[in-house]
Amino acid sequence: MNPKFGVLVSPENFIWTKHGLLTVWELQPGDKIIGLGPNRKIGTFELTEPISSHGASELTTLDSKQITTTLSGEARVSTGDGISKLNSLQPEDSIDLLHAENCERLQKICVQREESASYSGTKISPKLAYLLAKSIPMPQARTEYTVKIVTTGEQDQKNVNKFLDDIKSTLKGRSFTKIGRIKGSGRFNKMHESELTTRTFFSSKILYKLSQEINLKQENTLRWNRRTEFQIPTFVRNNGFDVMDAFFWSILEVCSTGPKLIPIGTDKKDVMVRTFIKDLSWINGLRIDSATIDKGVPMIRFRRDKWKKLADRDENFTTLKEVGTSTGNAFVLPVPANWDPIIDSIAVRRHKINYKEE
């Protein structure tokens, strides 16, 4: 078989397209992939052939605060010392990520489809995506199709109330509130009485069914390394930047523990969740304060007081913490000459892909 030119990609990576973030095996001929073109300006090129499997391949994983990306070791990226193959990189090397001005352009290029993605006939808007990121199905509730909506502050609650009111005709349901106490909060006051809080619930078959696809779960604990689990289905990822962005900011609020700190603990297997968080944080201009494994729990931490506006970001690189090699299944992403697809937050140069003879 003749060699192809492209990039060997792990199925756990995300590729930026005109309509969102897709894994390589979700791509279809005709999809527009976002990349840096011949003039090094961001634009799109069309995928003209089906994605093919390369089978078991030698792969290199780059891990830092801002990226977790697995590609062929032959793939090339920009570093502080020029263009380097992944298999030649070492911890403490610096990788160039998408520059701030190109992040701004990507946000404008990545748009909803003319017929926006829907789920069972329900169109997914940014407001609905914001609500979905904080909705937990309550199958044991007395009222059928009830979800609990997780809110963490006054402004978050205002957003939820407004969005529920704005799209209640779409959701075809009703909201109600209950007053309860915050478990464990009594240890922080002299009377040792737990704090009161208002919890928002919504009864809607549409919201209930959609929230089952997200499957949000949070450990019922006040530990600093509390785990949060959720899924990011294609109707969220393939519906334009604004829908993904609303979902992302809502997840940050769900995990917030106060006015400054946002710790997001995930399950070890949830590589794609961590990659999604890292990708959206970089495109928004948010620096991750730390990405560590604390007592077996992968943690991503943000500090609101250290956030800068995207336009004010003066560093467009990330320093590698680990570089690992492995053998795993990979897919061939064909790339035309003079184009570098944006995989996660990296512009990746194409390389020659050889096939083993049968």
Image (spheres, rainbow, N blue to C red):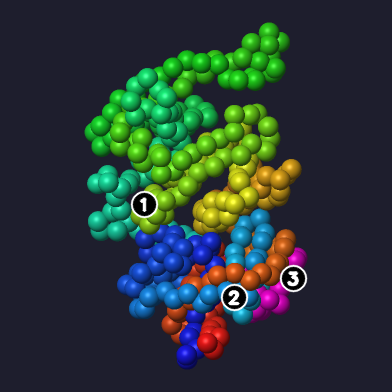
**Relative height, residue 333 to residue 233 (above, below):** below
Give the extent of the magenta segment: 80-98
Q: Is residue 37 visible?
A: no
Q: Is residue 249 visible?
A: yes
Q: Quadrant of residue 96?
A: bottom right
- Residue holding disc 2: 57
Q: Nearer the viewer, residue 131 or 72?
A: 72
Residue 220 image point, x, y percent: 59, 29
Q: Residue at x 46, y 67 (%)?
A: 24
Residue 288 image point, x, y percent: 63, 50
Q: Which mark is residue 235?
A: 1
- Left or right, 28 with respect to 287, comes to left
**Relative height, residue 251 to residue 97 (above, below):** above
Q: Farthest residue toward the bottom?
A: 2
Foreground label between 1 and 2: 2
Which three-letter amino acid code belongs to the residue tagged 1?
A: Phe
Q: Farthest residue toward the front?
A: 358
* Residue 85 within the segment the image draws in magenta: yes
Which three-letter amino acid code belongs to the residue tagged 3?
A: Gln
Residue 250 image point, x, y percent: 47, 40
- Left or right, 13 with respect to 91, comes to left
Give the mark, 1 or 2, whose residue is nearer the N terminus.
Answer: 2
Local SS, label 1? helix
Foreground label between 1 and 3: 1
Q: Nearer the viewer, residue 311 or 85?
A: 85
Q: Quadrant of residue 227?
A: top right
Q: Residue at x 47, y 19 (%)?
A: 198
Q: Residue at x 37, y 19 (%)?
A: 142
- Residue holding disc 3: 90
Q: Quadrant of residue 326?
A: bottom right
Q: Residue at x 57, y 51 (%)?
A: 270
